[in-house]
Amino acid sequence: MGRLVLRRLSATVPVLFLVTAGVFLLLHLTPGDPIDVMMAESVDATVKETLRRELGLDRPIHVQYAAWMGRLLQGDLGRSIRNGEPVIENVSRRLRPSLELAFFAMTISLLVAFPVGIVSAIRRNTAIDRAGATFALFGICMPNFLLALLLIFFFGVTLRWLPISGYTDPLEEPWNGVRSLALPAITLGLALAAVVTRTLRSSLLEALTEDYVRTARAKGLSEWRVIWGHVLKNALIPVVTVLGLQLGTLIGGAVITEYVFALPGVGRLVVDAVFARDYPLVQGVVLLIAVGFIVSNLVVDVLYGWIDPRIRSR
Amino acid sequence: MATTNPRAALDVSRRNFLRLFAAASGASLVSRDPRAALAAEPKRGGTLRVGFYIEAATMDPHLSGSKIDRQVYHNIYEPLVTLDVKLGIKPGLAESWQQPDSKTVVFKLRRGVKFHDGTDFNAEAARFNFNRMKTEPKSVRKGEVASIDSVDVVDAYTIKINLKRPDAALLATLTDRAGMMVSPKVAQEKGSELERNAKGAGTGPFEFVEWVKDSHLVIKRNDNYWNKQGGPYLDRVRYRPIPDDTVKLQSLQTGEIDVMDYVQPRDVAAVKADRSVVVVDVPSLADFAYQLNHTRPPFTTKALRQAVAYALDLEQIVKGVWLNVGVPANGPIPPTSWAYDRGIPPIKRDLAKVKAKLAEGGQPGGFTFTMTTNNIPINVQEAEVIQAQLREAGITMKIKLVDSATLISDGNNKNFEMISYQWSGRPDPDGNTYQFYKTTPGTSLNWSGISNPQIDALLDKSREVSSQAERKKLFSELTKILQDELPMVFIVHPIEPKAFSPKVQGYEPIPDGMMRFKDVWLA
Amino acid sequence: MLRRAARARLAPFGAAVVVLASLVALAAPLVAPYDPLAQDLGATLAPPGRGHLLGTDNVGRDVLSRVIWGTRVSLLAGLVSVVLAVFAGSALGLVAGYCGGRVDGVVMRVMDAVLSFPPLVLALALGAVLGAGLTGVLLALGVVYTPTFARLMRGQVLSIAARDYVDAARALGAPAWRIAARHVVPNAINPIIVQASLSVAFAILAEASLSFLGLGIQPPQASWGSMINAGRGYLQQAPWIVFGPGAALFVTVVALNFVGDAVRDALDPRTRE
């Protein structure tokens, strides 16, 4: 297992290099300049020049990249241009709401997907199954920005049950925190629930055709016992895959949801940083998102081994 | 103007202003404000929750380049002089001032003022601040205090500012960040830490408490505030960034915040009908226009610039896009300013003239150009309306939407034909004109690239002359020339409505749009 | 099986919607009751009714007509970006799988990099570099979907290349391109088609999301996403600006999913049984 992890990690080094170089190049090709954005209403060219020199923005692109790489190898992600704060602090502050949001969204999706998926598999081809399938389709096809707007409209503005914007840390104020994350978590969770439901249902159905299930049924076990006792664990692998792949997306990619609900998460950080041309910040966040994506893939593989020992030996 | 009596100057401008103001907003603000009826006694206490569109960038006023920072500064820092509701200059940390000659200003400073860290505010502190603005490498104030040569300490509470050249706009400049006084002790001890933490740094009615980035910024009442009249009443003010306008408004309606900095024109009518929210129209200093590139075809040709100007129906734009939350612009100077000339009408639509100008410009069949504008809903809407109006006049306009970083870069590099320019405005008309129309090589806000000796002379003269009446004449002349030369087509002077929960009392709208909470209280 | 039957009923429905949408897109000028760009500042935010079936927007344009014209943009965006990805991805996958070794390593690492790149950053940057517009978004989406097809094609190549008849062809001295064209591509095409048909729906959603953030189609033209973006500020006063294009988007994506499922049932041997 350790060797697998090591091998996989070393394979990610070139990928990360490509990602950072790509971001760097794209950003610098993009018109606009961080200092101009910062001082949009000032024309003092000397001040701007001084700042640019101080930040090394006057040097050629490859020199800047090399400098950035050099600092990175020493574990330094640099500082944000806009507010002078170390990138790592900036990101770790933003990571918390994103992780919490991802956690709640996954919780919601599992709470919905497991009952719906299991019932659909057992009562396959009944009205219940079709209702479940319709729900899943709805979740997959609903654009999350539309869902977010509708949720705000109904729960926030019309019924006024839940706050529609802002973030309270659930670890500090549990009740208010959960309330502040409720609507965004539902927005993300519903789409995720749809994917998980589909995956769970089809993998359950596949597992139900296996020999050991027939044996179990022959022993006279009820359908529920068969599922609980035998099938579920084996049907979990695709679900874990889906969740793992989605985790990376949830943390870095919940941009629209974070934007609409004014949540200070990583996704919004990236977009704001791109708009401000805050080069070091964009670089740092993209790198960390990429690392997160790769790690979550790795975790999925490790979990595979735990769920299905046959894979471990390979 | 040997001696400036602030009161006298104020009286003149007040009369002037009231008239303009009524013209600007269509009604008197005071009578429309429903809270005028509630003449209750102010109450102490409570936390005011404020929603802003973006987070502050820095707490150091000398390093600040972002408009939003000023909203917080005007509650924790104080400038030497301040603006009143009518844009008159009134005493701030300076009690009075004199101008013995056109290149000298003497300020008598207020006694008994302490910074929040307990140190005294005095002449030495003031000099320290001006030197810091001029010499600190990262200072963003350098351009604003460029006319200042040196600052002398005359006695413990008197400073003398020596100017390199006459600067009629200086006092107005000192009403904002360039006049704000930071505790020398805090600035020296904290260094760059001041950017994140302004504890002890100001003299204002509120003290900095904490700033949790991306979450909130809190200030609390300064119980030792020097001015014992009126507030501060509020225990605390809590600022929160809410970037989405719709969500911000809904947060106000659902009671999650008490104040929001700006209501979009599209929401004004609905919000005014909503009893749970009070809207106050604050006329602004702003000047929204499109710069025309004089250095590249088609707008190297004056007749084609004029053709575009005559093709626009400003009334319709202001009514249809801005929903009358603003007034059609006749030039760069807003109706809130003493320099605004009501005698000059905005350019009127005249399709016959467009035809003539197109022929004169050698394009009788019309021509095609591209407008570059910011990707924000109201800009898009305005661009679409302008596009339709130009099409009726036989001119084809393409729209290029960009983010603000690209917009600024395109403007600075003169990489555009027509580009949106939304200037937040300055209290002195100089701030809305000089840097846009004065011949300047290289990068500047003169994106159009206009270079006109007559305009240059007028602009320079307006800085040297100190009589307000005479300056006003110069600016009127300037406005007329601008309407002919058209470095920009002027569109609108927007009103910037702010919205409050009905329990918020005592807010005084000043056209610079800053929300000063000294006398605000919660019913 | 019942589910298959249900699908069998849904597929024609989906196909009908997709065909209808395509026809509407092609015949937009004939179908739209109004000029989608014609403004009427005197009749802004008019509710749905006789004159305007889906109401008017913030500059008084007919929402229905704009939804109809927006169909063009949305369908085009979905198709073009997926076609780009299919071609680029298949070519890369083919090369990687066939050449193997170092080429394979490089190509697949680049694909991994693209996969772990936040798609939005890519779209933002491409939009800024290429100038705002549909092109940037189409390219960005094309790039985002490329690795999927590259992986798929590479996998197919590896499994097919090991088969006897390919070995035989190689032994007979057939050049690599002919082997690819004759044997590999035809065998790999089914899974690619399945994946492509499902991707179109997501590409349409993605274009709408990017338009929602203000990237993509330039005004005054509209796509469903940009209409929803323009209308979100009016959700309280004039929800129809959002509901019209929102419904169109949702129904189209659902229909495309039905079609995609049907295509998979027909072509994928694993579900065919």
Image (cartoon, rainbow, N blue to C red):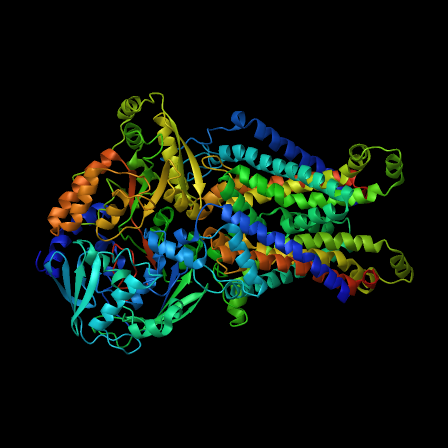
> Residue C183 location in percent, x, y?
82, 35
Decide if residue C145 is on the left or right side of residue A226.
Answer: left
Q: Residue furthest bottom?
A: B118
As rendered, which of B217 and B455 lies closer to the eye? B455
Residue B91 against residue B284 in the figure, above or below: below
As rendered, which of C118 and B40 lies closer to the eye? C118
Q: Quadrant of residue C85?
A: top right
Q: Quadrant of the N terminus of chain B?
A: bottom left
> Residue A62 location in percent, x, y?
53, 51
Residue B389 against residue C111 in the figure, above or below: above
Decide if residue A202 is on the left or right side of residue B435.
Answer: right
As rendered, which of B394 and C87 lies closer to the eye? C87
Decide if residue C160 is on the left or right side of residue A119.
Answer: right
> Residue B346 location in percent, x, y?
23, 37
* Identity of the residue drawn at 26% across and 51% down: B283
Q: Residue furthest left?
A: B2
* Identity of the residue drawn at 20% across and 45% down: B23
> Residue C11 location in percent, x, y?
71, 37
Decide if residue C150 is on the left or right side of residue B246.
Answer: right
Q: Quadrant of the C terminus of chain B?
A: bottom left
Asked whether residue A287 is in view, the answer is yes
Asked whether residue B342 is in view, the answer is no
* Identity of the residue drawn at 35% across and 54% down: B262
Q: How many numbered badges does the structure rendering display?
A: 0
As rendered, which of B358 and B162 lies closer to the eye? B162
